[in-house]
Image (spheres, rainbow, N blue to C red):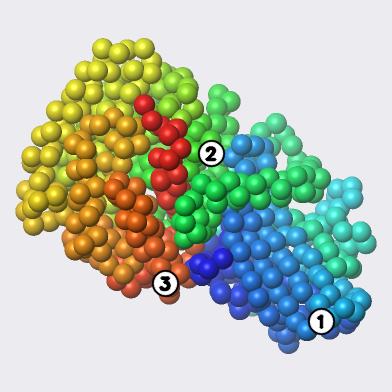
Amino acid sequence: MKLRAPCVPLITVDPYFSIWSNCDRLTDGETVHWTGAKQPLTGVVTVDGDPFVFMGKREGVPALEQTALEITACTTRYTFRNETVELRAAFTTPLLLDDLSVASRPVSYLKVTVASVDGAAHKVRLAVTMDDSICLDRKFQYDTVYAPLSAPGLTGGSVGSAVQKVLNRSGDDLRIDWGRAYLATDAAGARAECVEYRGEEGACAHDVTLTADGPEALFAFAYDDVRSIRYFGEDLPSYWNKDGKTIETAIAEAFADYEAVAARCDALAQDLRARCRTEQYYELLSLAYRQAVAAHKLAVDQNGDLVFISKECFSNGCAATVDVTYPSIPLFLLYRPELVNAMLRPIFRFAHSGEWPFDFAPHDAGQYPLVNGQAYGNKIEEKYQMPVEECGNVLIAVAAAALASKDTSFARQHWEDLEKWTAYLTRYGLDPANQLCTDDFAGHLAHNCNLAVKAVMGVAAFGILNDLCGHPEKGAALRKSAREMAAAWVVNARDEENVYRLAFDQPGTWSMKYNAVWDKIFGTGIFPEKAFSEEIAVHLAKHMNPYGLPLDNRAAYTKSDWLLWTATMADTEEQFDAFVASLWRAYNESGSRVPLTDWYFTDTALQRGFQNRTVQGGLFIRLLLDSGKCRV
């Protein structure tokens, strides 16, 4: 892999069970949670009595030299070497969306193999240590309690907080402090031990170490969170244990499945590579895949329906945020369209809760992991809402999922809301009032041209749904309405030749019109052909910075998702590749060593805000277009 990842995924299961390396070499520092809090994992190989570190740091123990790093959709592979041996370490989290039982199982693998490089036989011992901070918001927050793992054929141990308050709070920069973390191996003759010690605060800590003799061992890290989501007053388990499966059973199944699962992960990576025309695009998507999936939690609601809850990471911690769902959906439309419906299900539930007074769509359904109703804004008042934004997002997402899955049942179930929210866009969407859009960090903006494009495509999307559901006359009327809106938009938004304004009343301004990408994906022809590709040519000639195209003329920052959505409307492959190359350079050279940020400066590549968000699923937008899955 040529891309120097700003942060390397190791364990990526869900927003709480998520461990990364923010160093160029795995031995340069301690591993961290996606928030940056230390959650150390340590690996030591002993060769003929001499110890060497291959993961993390160990005082007084030299590190093996790292010689290679490869990141694919579900696996991160490191290679280390000295004059005696070569060690390979493969971290795999099998987020296989065609198998939700495996994808939601909270077990992540580390396969370690050691080979001689000097031709001699060597006595090898492998040891992996898991720090108990993995089950606490902060180290020494509470006493922790160790227990041996009880599962036939496995050796291991678990650790958890002595204070178990399940789903006790919500927030953004927080780690889990309930449930138990597990470390296990199936290596013959392996030994588990626990080191107990006290911190300055007086809390008793327990770190778990597994040791295996021999040149190869498979380790598994697992986490049992007991209950995963509070969903409108009821605590839900995860999908994997919805029928009462124990974590011990899940760990045992994971070991039994490893070879087959690893092969499927490799096949996913090979398929992804075949879909991407350039290596740079493939490397970006490989790095984005696990992040986008693992910033969600999959559960089943009280009616037996899937809910796929996102966390708005390092934004405000909101759960099931519609304008986070919207940019993330390209990945899921490609690999499992029903998960798009599962993202939106909490929004429709809240809209009918009696607490939502408006005739437009809500912004979110809670703050992770408490999904009890909208958390965004100080109060449920109109000035804190995103009316055009969220109505357009829901309508486009539902239509895209219906096309990709060839199933309209979810749309039919929520038809009344979709019709109401389309009426809102028809009435108010062509010239939006002074309100927020998904780029809310830029503040309120009246007469937002890009937001109006979303409204137009939202109306068109409901036209598509009417066609799919057997209402051709209504579908035709909605498409006609969308085209009339688009014709007025072109006149009102035009600035200089081939450039459209940021806001209708602001001459001399410009912005990315990323929402128009759905006209190309759906093949609806709502806007004039080449309207936006011609604007992109101007952007490339006049507005492009070393690390990408700014979001608009107001600031040098951009959004990674919108960057590639805009690129997907380009006329030529070379233009698309130029956008991809700018994003690749940004991540390759950025001094911000965090899981992919989607909000960064195009002149310095430094993070402006946000990290580890699901919106990186939006980078798959070009593959969605190429697939034709959402074409009418």
Quick check: 101 left or right of 345? right
Who comes first in sequence, dot 2 or dot 1?
1
Cα–Cα gap, marks 2 and 1: 43 Å
Vertical relation: 230 (above or below) 311: above
What is the secondary structure assignment of the residue under circle 2?
helix
Q: Quadrant of the N terminus?
A: bottom right
At label 1, counting other C-alpha atoms closer than 10 Å, the crowd grade (few under 14, some 14-19, many 20 or more) is some
Of residue 551 and residue 186, the one placed in the foreground of this image is 551
Residue at x 75%, y 60% (from the top left corner): 111
The image quadrant that residue 423 belongs to is top left
Helix, strand or loop at disc 3? loop
Residue 272 rendering spot, x and y as whole percentages: 55, 48
Q: Which mark is residue 335?
A: 2
Q: Is residue 312 visible?
A: no
Q: Report the amino acid beneath label 1.
A: Thr
Report, in whole angstroms, how far the alpha carbon at label 1 lies from the one at label 3: 35 Å
Quadrant in the rendering for residue 431: top left
Q: Is residue 105 above or below residue 290?
A: above
Amino acid beneath label 3: Ser
The residue pinned by badge 3 equals 590
- Give the CA separation, mark 3 to mark 2: 30 Å
**Label 2 Cα crowd, 10 Å radius (few <14 / some 14-19 / many 20+):** some
**Residue 597 visible from this viewpoint:** yes
Which quadrant is home to the C terminus?
Answer: top left
Circle number at residue 181: none
Q: Position of residue 470 (x, y in %)?
A: 36, 12
Quickly name the residue at label 1. 84
Hey, which residue is sitting farthest bottom in the picture? 60
Sequence-earlier tag: 3 or 2: 2
Position of 508 with respect to 555 (left or right) is left
